[in-house]
Amino acid sequence: MTSLPVVNQPPHRCGALLDQLARRLRLRSESVLTPLGLRPRHLIALTVLRDQRGSSQQDLAKILAIDGTNVVGLLNELEAENLVERRRSPVDRRRHIVELTDVGAKLLARAEFALAAVEDEVFSGLDEDQRETLYTLLQQVTNTTNVEACTEAVTRPTC
């Protein structure tokens, strides 16, 4: 059986390499987060709360793109470890405002330090300029990818 020629295609495809790299980063990241008692979803929530200087539970659910019920579970886990604090909004008593505690801020800083070491390890084959170029390219692709099309990839592969 003869194979059909691929016309007008770039000589190299990046998807499999990006998947392999993402898997390596994820495994190494989880290995440094676990001793800190954190999971990736904890890290993301803590980072958002730090960067936003707090958030309502509803806004946090939107930012994290997860169901409100799952946000409550996530916040229960973080609150049990004294990493976040929920309180009623003084403006609207029906809403809860979530803020990072000092304990949460310190743990987040430790986690980010550990993750920086992971990135240094995983990207050790690149010099500083190459890493900056990679970051710029990834940011460019991320900012221009049609997210809606990616969610429909199951029925119509577009990403």
Image (cartoon, rainbow, N blue to C red):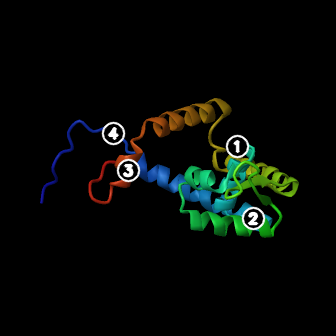
Task: Give amino acid for label 1.
Answer: Gln
Residue beneath disc 1: 52
Mark 3 element type: helix
Q: Earlier in the sequence, mark 4 or mark 2?
A: 4
What is the distance, in whole Å, between disc 1 and disc 2 at their CAs? 17 Å
Report how far apart the C-alphas of labels 2 and 3 lie in the structure.
31 Å
**Circle 3 sits on which residue?**
150
Point out residue 131 in the picture as x, y percentages from the top left corner. 62, 36
Looking at the image, tell me whether mark 3 or mark 4 is earlier in sequence order.
Answer: 4
Image marks 2 and 3: residues in contact by CB distance under 8 Å: no
| Residue at image location 49% in from the left, 33% down from the top | 140
Q: Is residue 20 above or below residue 73?
A: above
Mark 1 or mark 4, whichever is nearer to me: 1
Spatial separation of the CA atoms under disc 1 and disc 4: 42 Å
What residue sits 38% from the left and 47% below the top? 148
In the image, residue 35 sits, relative to residue 139, either above or below, namely below
- Front of the two marks 3 and 1: 1
Rendered image quadrant of residue 77: bottom right
What kind of element bears circle 1? helix
Front residue (pair 137, 107): 107
Helix, strand or loop at mark 4: loop
Residue wearing tag 2: 78
Q: Amino acid at mark 3?
A: Cys
- Identity, as a three-letter code, of the amino acid under mark 4: Pro
Instruction: Give the quadrant of the N terminus.
Output: bottom left
Which numbered dot is residue 11?
4
In the image, which is nearer the foreground, mark 3 or mark 4? 3
Left or right of 21 on screen, residue 39:
right
Residue drawn at the location 16% of the way across and 53% of the way down: 3
The label on residue 153 is none
